[in-house]
Image (tube, rainbow, N blue to C red):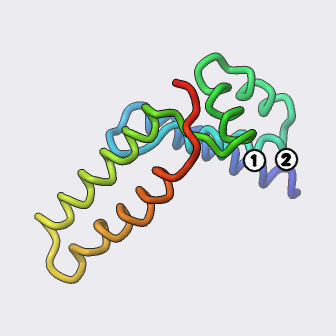
Amino acid sequence: MVRLLYMLLGWTSLLLGAAGALLPLLPTVPFVILAAYFFARGSPALERWLVEHRRFGPHISAWRSRGAISRKGKAAALLCFALSAALGLLLLAFPWSLAPLAAGLIGGSWIATRPEAQD
């Protein structure tokens, strides 16, 4: 039963990652890393496929070994945080307008302090 739950969570994460490849502001790689985590517990074959994938494998390995994020990944994430914060400040009423700004500052600070992986 637990293995089935991990498989379901893995496929859900992978689908969200696929959606992120098409939708702006929805990240791809973090969901693929999360899918690899769940597949490691639910399906070692699917986890191996993700880890050996030519596009996502290096990101997963860098995250697992050093908690590292590529320079391009950091830049994309920080840009999305900045856009979200700016839109929140422009479109939301106070004090709700501060929520995206706070999330961007907290999340962006955390991402900026991660080690840098090779692009």
Q: Nearer the viewer, residue 23 or 68?
A: 68
Q: How many marks?
A: 2
Task: Point out residue 31 in the picture as x, y percentages from the top left corner.
Answer: 57, 44
Q: Residue furthest top?
A: 54
Image quadrant holding the N terminus, namely bottom right
Under mark 1, the amino acid is Phe
Residue 77 shown left or right of residue 87 in the figure = right
Under mark 2, the amino acid is Arg
Name the residue located 78 percent from the left edge and 33 percent from the top edge. 47
Name the residue located 53 percent from the left edge and 38 percent from the top edge. 17
Name the residue located 50 percent from the left edge and 58 percent from the top edge. 110
Q: Which residue is mark 1?
A: 38
Quadrant in which residue 65 is drawn: top right
CA neighbours of label 1 inside 10 A, class few (<14), some (14 to 19), many (20+): many
Task: Point out residue 87 in the picture as x, y percentages from the top left corner.
Answer: 18, 58
Residue 89 shown left or right of residue 63 in the figure = left
Q: Secondary structure at mark 1?
A: helix
Task: Point out residue 55 in the picture as x, y percentages from the top left corner.
Answer: 58, 20
Task: Point out residue 96 in the picture as x, y percentages from the top left corner.
Answer: 24, 78
Q: Which residue is mark 2?
A: 41
CA neighbours of label 2 inside 10 A, class few (<14), some (14 to 19), many (20+): some
Whole-number angstrom distance, CA of label 2 to CA of label 1: 5 Å
Q: Above or below — where is 102 with respect to 62?
A: below
Instruction: Tell me if label 2 and label 1 are in contact, CB under 8 Å.
Output: yes
Q: Residue furthest left?
A: 90
Residue 105 shown left or right of residue 28 in the figure = left
Q: Nearer the viewer, residue 36 or 77?
A: 77
Q: Nearer the viewer, residue 97 or 22?
A: 97
Name the residue located 30 percent from the left edge and 66 percent from the top edge. 100
Q: Secondary structure at mark 2?
A: helix
